[in-house]
Amino acid sequence: MTTVEHGPAVPQQVAKATVPGFERPLTIFEHSVPDRRGVRPPPAAVPAAPSDALPASMRRKAPAALPEVGELDTQRHYTWLSEKNFSIANAFYPLGSCTMKYNPLVNERVCALPGLSALHPMQPDDQVQGMLELCWRVERVLLAVSGLHEVSLHPCAGAHGELTALMCMRACLDDRGQTHKKIILIPDSAHGTNPASCTIAGFETREVKSNQHGRVDMADLDKKIGDGHDIAGLMITNPSTLGLFETNIKAICEKIHAVGGLVYMDGANMNAILGRTRPGDFGADVMHFNLHKTFSQPHGGGGPGAGPIAVRDVLAPFLPTPKIARVSDGQGGWRFETVMSAPKSIGRTRGFMLNAGVMVRSYSYMRSNGPAGLKGIADNAVLNANYLRAKLKDTYKVWIDESCMHEFVATAKGMPNGIRALDVAKRLIDYGIHPPTVYFPLIVPEALMIEPTETESKQTLDTFVAVMKAIAAEAETDPDTLHTAPHTRSIGRPDEVRAVKEPKVTL
Amino acid sequence: MTYVQNTEREKAEMLAAIGCKSVDDLMAVIPEDCRFVGELDVEPALTEDELVRHVRALTASNVSADGHPCFLGAGAYRHFCPSLVDSLVARTEFWTAYTPYQPEASQGTLTTILEWQTMMCRLTGMEVSNASLYDGATAVVEAVLMALRVKSKATRVVVSEGVHPDAIGCLKTYLKCLDVELVTVPLVDGASDAPALAQAATDGTAAVVVQSPNFFGVVEELQPLVDAAHAHGALSVVAADPVSLGVLEPPGAFGADMVCGEATGMGNPPWFGGPGVGYLCARSENVRQMPARIAGETVDAQGRRAVVLTFQTREQHIRRSKATSNICTSQQLMALRATIWMALLGKQGFVELSEVNLARAHHAAARIAKIPGYGLAHAKRAFFNEFTVTTPIAARDVNRRLLDEHGILGGYDLGQVDPSRSKQLLLAVTDSNPADEIDALVAALETIR
């Protein structure tokens, strides 16, 4: 194992010594023994269903070949698998655009309060007033930080928020009789979800170039807007995926508005601007939040998240239903209602109403921080990112070397001995650090996109700097170690081509 | 309260290293006319202790199935969950991990995805599965969008009214954007109408969508429904509650092209409707048209078994506007719960649990049908763990009296989806409703006329 001074602990490794034929099985299926039982379900304790309850044609002929394993072996198997994971709890994740910050445990404790997880989505409003009020309060915080007018907590994830918002934009334009507006402009630095969401919402996309400062090229924007006849809107990420504030943002929004378009703001990087600027104030008409980034819902190995959207008043009638409304209870207080439909609403884009479990965690995080804490998130995210940029820029070329927001993009281009961004990324794993986002944004060759978040300490950042410098030195002296990294995990680089050419997606 | 660790002294050192005096200097890149000045209009910060008390007080007024017998289903079913599921999923290595894009740092999560895909395929009788989708309703949408990619010239989708109304609602929203016609076909005595579906699914239809057990609890006779889709070359999409597949023949056995639905009930609480987990299984010939993540097994340079995300060229981060979907989330933690849940129940236990649902629901239905004024709305149809009961007074009033007078959370008032069904109650009876709860429900209904 490679170490540097004060290095973070490398995640626990699985035992390396094994006796041939007695290696630990990779999957739960290989632990299976005929007739072994795990957990027994409760007995029916009522008479069996009549034999004709299901016609023979509907009866399952052979049971599904699920594993046959005991509780202890199951516990060991999944504990062993968990140890093969990097996670926030055991490693630094300078993962650009993903905002891998600390997931406070009080959020989990609040979620575990009695009765919350057992609430059924079809319970009438009068039985779930507390849950509805909590969600309504989440909406208030999102309004406060966005400067917009109405929020929907409906979408399941960031990309789902994009799609839902684009559908609202389509409905709004159609309502204005502008069905011919079909083009969404998207800067070339955008997340892949932006153009993908446009396609599913029935729009066409047109790419806008970045200038040498990593900002939207205003001349190209003018050119792509043209006479503006077909322009439905713009999707813009601010701060951008280069970690830069879009300094012309007001002018950009005005140009879109001037041709009757709507401005969508991808809120993936909201972490950087909380309490410092508000999308509603600089011209955005609609945005989504990634509650799993900005408001610390744990990533869970890929989900769940939630992607609420906030809109300006012109888009509010089109928001999805069901949604929450607060109404007077007639006795000087309030009650909360689920609005199931609205005349101009796009309708629903998911089952039930919202990801309540995510809302509870986010509410907990919002209330832990309060107004000063929320601003402190942005301030410290920006401070940590600029510190890393300053300390690394002599070793790794920073693509746009100026004051950044919550992240910056360096490049491995020009490293010696054919070392690529992927090699640096894989070598970081040996040092117990999760790789940065690599090869994104697409406009930077050999990109290393680095986002430390506000919750990392200076010691961790200093260690990361030392490791990155050590890797740069290794690139000179020991490139093979980098080319073949990582060396300390249960596997080396897997053969991804084979996974496509000889697909094995079930066991 | 803040989760920022750096001290004021460290911050000063960091600013010095950057070469500026304050964070305000760094924030000066935000043009002056865009800056927000002042304090955010949000409520003051709470300490950890205050926060727990506050949320407890805020949510105390909720009435929950934790304290009351509950017979609500309608797409969200409660099932027994072994303690080990909570314990394992509480491992921070699972719940604080990122999406497994770096396989060497994510073999744990990736292996569980491969296990999940395998289990879902074996349950549904299908060949390929993805890593999960947002929920059951969007899983139906994604299956239909997938069918539209496979049948790229098609302009119509046919759906039975037995499909969950949320899924039909989502289909309406999504398909409107794509100028695809959505044809809904009414039920006959609570079951899908195969001839009518076949008639609606003329040339140019991408998919025929049915659900079994359907929204009203009826187990569909799947073979004619699958055949109705195939008659003119459409794909057959079947939404199914996976828990029912312990006793029901899997849709794959009838030739379904896609099987999808809500898997939340397997090891996950209802959580007021989310986060849940959807699943989507298909035939291997269509794997490249599937949305979202798929894990696959391969080897590393030393020949060691490894699991990776595969077929990534379908996905948004590579294909952008031409991707098979915009999704870059899997409901991984929920899918992990379901995976461990299925493993713990195992081959026999899964069937037994499914049988318990069947037995309890039939026991309850038979007794309720004998109560004067009550009956089964679709008495000739087969059902699994949910059934539609006709009520002597409005279902809504039955529910109100069940709670007020007996402390029971009743069923789903079907009048909410169809005014002509306002005297029908959809009751779910699962392994989470022990015999004494069924006794209590029957006794209560006997007093509600």
Image (cartoon, coloured by chain):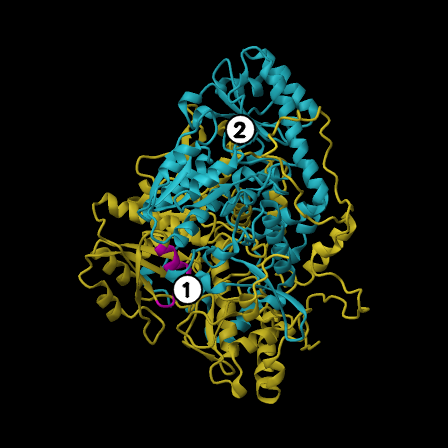
Chain letter for the cyan colouring in the rendering: B
Spot occupied by residue B426 in the image (x, y as percentages of width and height): 53, 26
Q: Position of residue A225 (x, y in %)?
A: 23, 63
Which residue is more in the foreground, B282 or A221? B282
Asked if the stretch drawn in magenta spans residue B356, the answer is no
> Which numbered marker is on residue A127?
2
For residue A78, say whether it is visible. no
Residue at position x 42%, y 66% in the image? A241
Task: Specify the amino acid type for callout 1.
Answer: Arg
- Label 1: element kind: helix
Q: Is residue A371 left or right of residue A507?
A: left
Question: How many numbered markers are drawn?
Answer: 2
The furthest residue to the left: A227
Kindly report which numbered mark, 2 or 1, lies closer to the viewer in this rendering.
1
Crowding at dot 1, Cα within 10 Å, few <14 / some 14-19 / many 20+, comes out as some
Label 2 and label 1: CA atoms lie apart by 45 Å
> Is residue B6 visible to the viewer in this orientation of the structure?
yes
Q: Quadrant of residue A505?
A: bottom right
Kindly indicate whether the residue at mark 1 contacts the one at mark 2 (C-beta within 8 angstroms). Answer: no
Q: Where is residue B209 shown, x and y percent of the image?
A: 44, 40
| Residue that carries the numbered disc 1 in the rendered image | B319
Q: Residue furthest right?
A: A19
Visual hue assigned to chain A? yellow
Query: Magenta stretch?
Result: A188-199
Number of other residues with Cα within 10 Å of mark 2, as a class: few under 14, some 14 to 19, many 20 or more = some
User: Is residue B153 shown left or right of residue A379?
Assistant: left
